[in-house]
Image (cartoon, grey):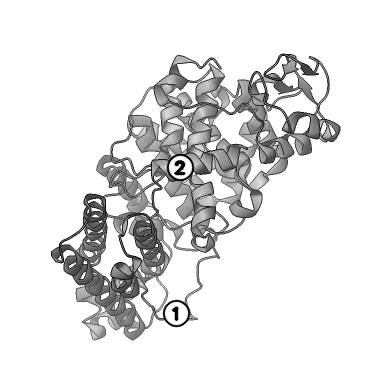
Amino acid sequence: MTSTSAHAELGLELPERPGTHCLEHLIQASATRELVVTEDIRDRRGILLVAKGQRINAGLRERLIARRLLRPLESSLAFCEELRPSEVQLAAQRELDEHPHLRVLLGDDVQSVMTALARARTLGAPGTLLTTLGQTRPAAFSHAVRAAMLVAWLAALLSRSDAAMREAAEVGLLHDLGEMYVDPAVLELPEAQQDFAQWRMHCVHPVISAALLGESGVYSAQQAAAAREHHERIDGSGYPVGAPVLSPLGRLISCAEALDALLEREHGHAHALARMRIALRMVPGQFPRDVVDLLTERLRDCALEPAPTHDPQGLREVVAASLDGLEQARDEVLRLQRGGDLREDERAALQHLLLLIVGYIMAIHDSGAGKMVEQLPWLIAAPEAAEEVDRICCELRWQLPGLRRHAALLAHRRARSADDWRPVLDALDIALPAAQAAHPPAPAPAAGAAPLQTAQVDEEAQSEAMTDALG
C-alpha cells in the first residue's frame, strides 16, 4: 500500500480489510444520501468486487467485509451530495443558539470563526466520513463542529493567520473520525465505566483519525499529527501515548477538545463559564500556559449572575476530604518509591503519578480553598467567596475519580504486583460529600465526556487495540 509522505512521517497505515463498524455507519448513511463507488473496488488478488459507479447498500456488506482490499475502502467511496460548507455553517449556528455560553466565549471573534468554517476543506475519505458522521452520529457531529469553532477561535486568540485558522477548523471537524471504527457500545459508555479492554479500544481512535488524514493526500502532516494528539496532555497524562511534547496545532486541538467537554458538562448551568475557569486552574500542567492564560482572562471577563447561597460547612468537608485523600496517596507513593527493587518503568510511573497528585494538592492550596473554608463566618458573609469554593468542590468531585482511574491503569500496566499499589488506589478512592441540594448539579456527563485527567496505553496494547478496532 502506498502512503503519502505525511502519512509515512507518522508511521500510520489504514487496513486492507474494511472496519466492520465503519462499514455499518457507511451503509446506514447510504439510506439517506446516495453513496457510490468512485473507483473499482478490488481485492488483493485483483478480483473485481464492486464496479465504479455502483451504489453502496446493505447487500454489499458481506462481499466487502470478508476480503482484503487492494486499497482502503474509504478512499473508493463518495456521496453524490457530500457535506456542503453551508451545512457546516448551519450546524455551527445551531450550536451557538443551543449553547449561549459558547457564543459569549467567542465574543467578537464569532464572525472570523464562521469564516474559517466556511473555508474548511472536507475532501477525500475524511470528507465522506464526516458526511457519514452527520447522518449516523449527530451528537458526535455537533461535537466536531463545536471543536472546530473552538480551535479556530484559539488560533485567532494567538494571532494566527486566516490560513492557520482554516487548517485548525479542519482538524476540529475531522479529529474524531477514528471513533467510527470503534464499537458503538463502547462509545456509549462513559469513560469512567469502561473496563481496560474497552478503554484500550477507545483510546486508539486518535491514531485512526490521524491515519485517515494522512492517507487522504489532502491534509498536511501537521494536521494529521494534531488529530493524533487531540487527547494528549503536556504533562504526559493524555492518550494514546502520553506524549508530553505536542505540535503547535496539537496544543490547540487538545485545549479545544477539553474546552468543549467542559462546555457540555456545564451546559445549562448559570455559572458555566466561571466553573470552566476553575476547571482550567484545577488541572495544573496539562495545558499550555499561554493558552490557559488567554482562556482564563476571557472567562474572567464574562459577566456572571449573582452567586447563590452555599453551606460553608459542607464545602469545608469536601476540601478536607480531598486534601486528606491526596496527601495520603502522596505518602503511599513515596513509601513505594523508598521501598526499592522497582523496575525502571514502574519507578517512572510512580514518579509521574506523584507529580500529578502533588499538582492537585498545590492547586487546591493555590486557589485559596483551604484557607477560605477555615473561616466559616467570613464565608457565610461573603457569598461570592463561597461560590468560588463551591466551584472548586464541584471540580474536585469531577476530577478526582479520573485521577484514581489513571492510577489504576498505571498499576495495571506498570506495577510488578498490583497489591503493592493497592494502598495508593485506596487513598485515591476519595468519598466526597454529595453536592448540596440547593445548588443545581451539573448535568450528567454524556458518553465520552470524561474528566480532563486521562491515561495512556503502551505501544503494544495500542497496536492490539488498533487491530481489534480496524478488523
- Give the structural element (helix, strand or loop) at label 1: loop
Q: Quadrant of the C terminus?
A: top right
Seen as rendered, the residue at the extreme right is: 59
Res. 434 mark: 1
- Give the structural element (helix, strand or loop) at label 2: helix
Q: Quadrant of the N terminus?
A: top right
The answer to whether 413 is drawn above or below residue 365 in the figure is above
Q: Which quadrant of the structure image shows residue 319? A: bottom left
Residue 239 place in picture, x, y as percent: 40, 45
Residue 11 vs residue 212, the one in the foreground: 11
Residue 43 place in picture, x, y as percent: 71, 20
Horizontally, residue 317 falls left or right of residue 37, namely left
Check disc 1 and give the amino acid type: Ala
Res. 462 mark: 2
Residue 255 vs residue 159, the one in the foreground: 255
The answer to whether 149 is drawn above or below residue 367 in the figure is above
Q: Depth-wise, is mark 2 or mark 1 nearer the camera?
A: 2
Residue 258 place in picture, x, y as percent: 43, 48
Q: Residue at x 86, y 33 (%)?
A: 59
Badge count: 2
Dot 2 or dot 1: first in sequence order is 1
Residue 145 vs residue 344, the one in the foreground: 344
Residue 422 place in picture, x, y as percent: 33, 71
Horizontally, residue 358 falls left or right of residue 165, namely left
Horizontally, residue 10 falls left or right of residue 449, namely left
Whether residue 288 is visible, yes or no, is yes
